[in-house]
Amino acid sequence: MKYLFTLSLAAGLLLGVSATLQADNSVVAKVGSREIKASEIQPYLDALPAPERGALLADKAELGRFVRGILVRQAVLQDATAAGWDKKPETVAGLSRVRDQYLVESYLVEVGKVPADYPADDEVKRVYEAEKDRLQMPKRYELSQIFIAADEDKASAQKRAAEIAAKAKDRPADFGTLAKANSNDAASAARDGKLGWLAEESIAPEIRKGVVGLSKGQISAPIEGRSGYHVIKVDDVRDAGVAPFDEVKAELTNLLRNRRMALNRESHVASLLERQPVSVNELALESLK
């Protein structure tokens, strides 16, 4: 498509800290004659939930597809505007409805806001104690990995994985350095090989088989996966049971904040309807058919 170019440049510039994007006003791409600046991409990233945004920024290929999608929409927007589509009566009416919906939703978000210090720790703890039966966690492993891809030469990849596993077992403290230097999984390598906490049943069966039975600090022999070999380090293990308070505190806090926000919204709407009662003429509804 002739109006798309330098997508790899866009992805490269955007693969970093969000604040850098906000400050950067360089042109990262063009759609037709329209230049797209890095600062224009920022709102799209900010609109994503934090975990999704973090994962996107850590994956160059996905980030490139994300940016390309924005550019394609901009191209279609240019085309539609040039065709006068924004002036059509039905388009104007549709945009008005979207505007009204946005005004309503953004206003309700504002009136539903809760204080920054809500809820207090003691309230979160009360909910934690009351909800313990629903806060059961399965057995979990905190894992790190060094992944060696087996593209065409499987035997060579297996040998390399075995050599790296031996080095890692000799120097467990250097596992992160070895992962950063050798792992073919870019996302985990950038985090010293760390995969984070995984429930036992969520680990791929072939990996789980090699991990179950290992203790904290132990390193596996190379485990054959679907596309290569994994050398796994067990950073920690937690048996099944009630999730520790510190682990679920943030989630419970968000839950209480969302509940209070919903109550605030409902209360505001109820008060509004007291001042401006709504009534429907049931007989006249037939005319809508």
Image (cartoon, rainbow, N blue to C red):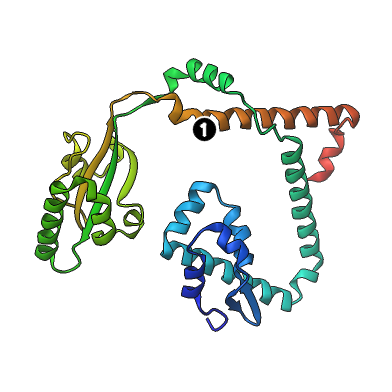
Q: Residue at x 52, y 71 (%)?
A: 10
Looking at the picture, which amino acid does disc 1 mark?
A: Ala
Left or right, 162 with respect to 259, comes to left
Q: Residue at x 23, y 50 (%)?
A: 174
In percent of width and height, residue 2 lies at: 54, 84
Q: Nearer the viewer, residue 75 or 36?
A: 36
Left or right, 20 with respect to 167, comes to right
Residue 41 sits in quarter:
bottom right
Q: Secondary structure at mark 1?
A: helix
Q: Is residue 210 visible?
A: yes
Q: Which residue is mark 1?
A: 250
Vertical relation: 121 (above or below) 60: above
Q: Residue at x 51, y 58 (%)?
A: 17
Quadrant containing the C terminus is top right
Vertical relation: 80 (above or below) 164: below
Q: Nearer the viewer, residue 167 or 201?
A: 167
Q: Residue at x 77, y 43 (%)?
A: 107
In percent of width and height, residue 30 lies at: 59, 78
Residue 31 sits in quarter:
bottom right
